[in-house]
Image (cartoon, helix red, strand yellow):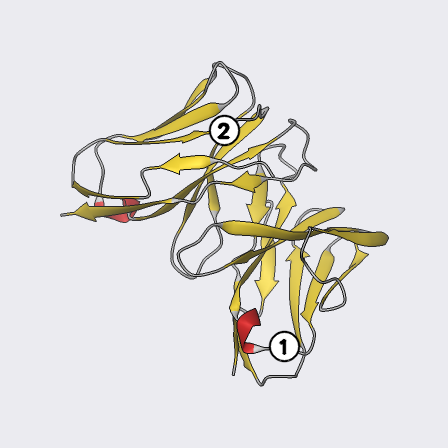
Amino acid sequence: GAVVSQHPSRVICKSGTSVKIECRSLDFQATTMFWYRQFPKQSLMLMATSNEGSKATYEQGVEKDKFLINHASLTLSTLTVTSAHPEDSSFYICSAPSPLGYGYTFGSGTRLTVV
Amino acid sequence: GQQLNQSPQSMFIQEGEDVSMNCTSSSIFNTWLWYKQDPGEGPVLLIALYKAGELTSNGRLTAQFGITRKDSFLNISASIPSDVGIYFCAAAPNSGGYQKVTFGIGTKLQVIP
């Protein structure tokens, strides 16, 4: 139980286009979803926290107009990278508090490459 | 902001050897977590610690929540090739499920058969 399904796993897009990443909690309700970005050989950096039914909370330095987060239901949170540029290329990972009360469950990540 | 100092950053060990890695912080955390990440995948939780002084095992893995609440270590006994990966410590200020989690920089473990 407590699976977070993240799609797509890999995406290549052209500079200037937008990309949507989805995270679904498959067998539990996630009122909160954390979105991270991870550059090669680096740790996970929290970008924003999405909450079902309310606005997301962004970390300092993260542009909310560029990284649009929507948490429309208790099982779906999305991150849209708008007007993507090569410097946005990274590994994006979502995470939700485990309903088992045991840490946090992560999605499998999305490798975004902007060309 | 809050930071976790994780060490070592990388290590090569022989199969069968024991491994130890640790995380320290200048701030107090009330939840410590250890994750393993394989290339191109999301982190997978190994052990969660919620009480200062707690020592918890998961198979060949053992982790402890430091009594000062500012550190934690992870031990892997009798390493095997599939232990290869990056291990992250993570910590949260409270024990509830909606806390921002801070991650260490990771320890890259390579096991020589």
Where is the N terminus of chain B found, in terms of image quarters? Answer: top right
Q: Position of residue A33 (x, y in %)?
A: 69, 50
Instruction: Name which residue lies at 65% across and 27% down.
Output: B94
Which residue is outermost to the right? Answer: A53
Position of residue B87 relative to residue B53, above or below, is below
Local crowd size for mark 2, using a 10 Å CA cut-off: few (<14), some (14–19), many (≥20): some
Q: Check the residue under mark 2 and report the chain it is in.
A: B
Side (left or right) of A24 relative to B84: right
Residue A62 seen: yes
Residue type, mark 1 in image = Ala
Q: Residue at x 73, y 46 (%)?
A: A32
B72 on left or right of A5: left
The residue at the point 44 percent across, 35 percent down is: B5
In the rendering, at what x and y percent does residue B76 appear? 29, 32
> Taking B20 as reference, is A30 left or right?
right
Q: In the figure, is residue A51 to the left or right of B78?
A: right
Crowd band around label 1 with a 10 angstrom C-alpha radius: few (<14), some (14–19), many (20+): many
**Quadrant of the rendered structure where residue A16 is?**
bottom right
Q: Which mark is residue B25?
A: 2
Residue B52, placed above or below residue A87: above
Residue B43 is situated, as x and y percent measured from the top left of the image, at: 48, 49
Q: Is residue A68 above or below residue A4?
A: below
Letter of the chain that mark 1 sits on in the rendering: A
* Amino acid at pointer 2: Ser
- Marks 2 and 1 sit apart, C-alpha to C-alpha, by 35 Å
**What residue did someone put label 1 on?**
A84
Element class at badge 2: loop
**Along the line of sight, the residue nearer the viewer: A40 or A30:** A40
